[in-house]
Amino acid sequence: MDALKLDLSHYRELLKQYINTQDESALYEAEQISKRSIQHNISLEEIINTHINALEDIYPELPENIQHSMSFLLEVMISYGLALQEFQDLRETQLEIKSEISVAARMQNTLLSTVKPDVEGFDIGVVSVPANQMNGDYHHFIHHEDGTVGITVADVIGKGIPAALCMSMIKYAMESFPSEHKNPSEILESLNRVVERNVDPSMFITMFYALFNPAASTISYSSAGHEPGFYYHAADDTFEEIRAKGVVLGVTDMAQYRQYEREIHAGDMIILLTDGVTECRQGDRFIESEEVLEVIKSFSHLSAQELVENVYKHFEKLQDFHLRDDFTLIIIKKDV
């Protein structure tokens, strides 16, 4: 306030100079007063009040209606100043939250990192892209000493930091299970109990868990309410839905999961995904599963990694480069 009083007489002289001459130098000096006012946290209403006082000094007989109009302006600026402060506080809070989410996203990438298996006779491709900073999808590979590979694809219904924490818990729960208990049905039943006891009831987790046996060219699997995958038969160039029934994780601690198994033949493909792939939208139109499979088929001559990346780029472009949901796609191709 002291800085404002020191500027008052100067402000009055500048205002008088501009009223009489419209001199540009007065406007320049006024800009400097504005900058100094910002530096000293002088509010808008204080500046307006200074202007009113200077105007009354210059024109002692200022008409009453003009005085009232200046008082009105002062009240408007008081409200404006309060609203501006609220906006700035909100903006600072948003920036803090954005920064925290960015840190959490990096932590998520570190905590949930996984190594794609390199398996002789098979080609595996993986792409997982979040719609926002935090990924609500989860995929993980567990390498067993006997050469089999556990494959997890999950979707947490409920995004952001709570979902990331939930997925971290699931990952470390799976890695803590004894190696002799690796059958998909056993894994899902164990995870279901963990989720039921430790995860908020408002969060739902769907999961597809498979045990891939490259030596036997088989895959056994169970599902906890997850999006069905697809199996491509190279012999007759057709796709078959990989459907497995099972309730989502955490609904009841008594849930049991049926286990399925199939043999993988030369040239065949196993396609595992989340609903961000099958529920892509072009405008208001949902993409049909048949269209997704046609796109996969059109790139099937490529390596598995090139295949999944090209499928992602196709649907990213189709959605104007703005994903509406997290996109996770895993494809396992058996060599011909």
Image: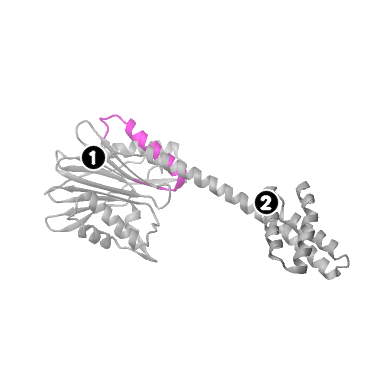
Depth order, front residue of 114/55? 55
Pinpoint residue 273: horizontal percent, then vertical percent. 30, 51
Instruction: Check residue 175 for magenta coloring.
Output: yes
Where residue 195 appears, as percent x and y from the top left, is 41, 39
From this viewpoint, is residue 256 visible? yes
- The residues colored magenta run 154-182
Residue 30 horizontal side relative to residue 286, left or right: right
Q: Which mark, by number, is residue 38?
A: 2
Q: Is residue 147 left or right of residue 195?
A: left
Badge 2 density bin: few <14, some 14–19, many ≥20, Cα 10 Å: few
The vertical placement of 182 against 128, above or below, is: above
Is 108 situated left or right of 38 in this image? left
Q: Earlier in the sequence, mark 1 or mark 2?
A: 2
| Numbered disc 1: secondary structure | loop
Mark nearest the camera among 1 and 2 is 2
Q: CA distance from mark 1 to mark 2?
A: 59 Å
Q: How is the image coloured?
A: one colour
Q: Residue at x 21, y 36 (%)?
A: 148
Image-based side of 5 in relation to 108, left or right: right
Q: Is residue 166 visible?
A: no
Residue that carries the numbered disc 1 in the rendered image: 117
Looking at the rendered structure, the secondary structure element under dot 2 is: helix
Using the image, determine if residue 46 lies above or below residue 216: below
Task: Name the one closer to the observer, 286 or 324.
Answer: 324
Residue 27 location, x and y as percent? 69, 62
Marking on residue 210: none
Residue at 19% in and 32% down = 146
Judge by depth and name the residue closer to the eye, 123 or 292. Answer: 123
Amino acid, disc 1 = Pro
